[in-house]
Image (cartoon, grey):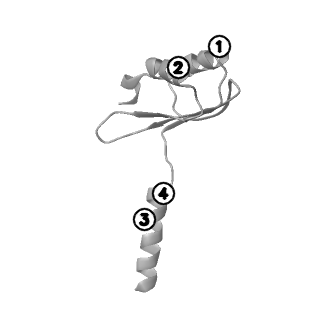
Amino acid sequence: MEYFLAASFIALFVYIAIDRPIVLIQFKDGEIVKKKGKIPHGFLNDCAEISKRTPFTGTIKVYRNRFNPAKLVLSKSIDHKVQQRIKNVFPHKSFK
């Protein structure tokens, strides 16, 4: 019985602790290093264009939320002006 409880607590902790974004895009010096998930083609092109004009290093993650269609999370290493440009081109309606 104790093993079952221990295993269930570990499984619950792993389920909560693992980072599970629906979209992940990693940039390094203005180049896309890693893409994961179903990314809208226009959003990917816009992000690539922004990164070519003002090169940055960081990650863009999109999470599915129960109340909001999608939550955009940008790493802190990205400049605030670039963050705003990415937020402006983010397609909220594509992630319903």
First in residue order: circle 2 vs circle 3: 3
**Is the residue under label 3 in contact with that under label 1 (CB below 8 Å)?**
no
Q: Residue at x 49, y 62 (%)?
A: 14
- Which residue lies under the disc numbered 4? 17
Mark pair 4, 1: CA separation: 36 Å
Instruction: Tell me the distance, in whole angstroms, between the alpha carbons under discs 4 and 3.
Output: 8 Å
Question: Which is more toward the observer, 13 or 3?
Answer: 13
- The residues tagged by marks 2 and 4 sit, at their Cα atoms, a distance apart of 31 Å
Residues marked 2 and 4 touching at CB (< 8 Å): no
Q: Badge 1, how many Cα within 10 Å: few under 14, some, many 20+?
A: few
Going from the N terminus, do you reach mark 4 or mark 3 first?
3
Residue matched to label 2: 81
In the rendered image, is residue 26 in sight? no
Position above or below: 36 against 94: below
- x and y, in percent, of residue 77 in the image: 60, 33
Q: Nearer the viewer, mark 4 or mark 3?
A: 4
Quick one: SS at disc 4? helix
Q: Identity of the amino acid at label 4?
A: Ala
Q: Quadrant of the C terminus?
A: top left
Q: List the residue tagged with mark 1.
A: 53
Give the mark nearer the N terminus: 2 vs 4: 4
Percent x, y of residue 15 = 45, 59
Q: Which residue is mark 3?
A: 12
Secondary-structure class at tag 1: helix
Residue type (three-letter) at the residue carrying disc 3? Leu
Q: Earlier in the sequence, mark 1 or mark 3?
A: 3
Three-letter residue code for mark 1: Arg
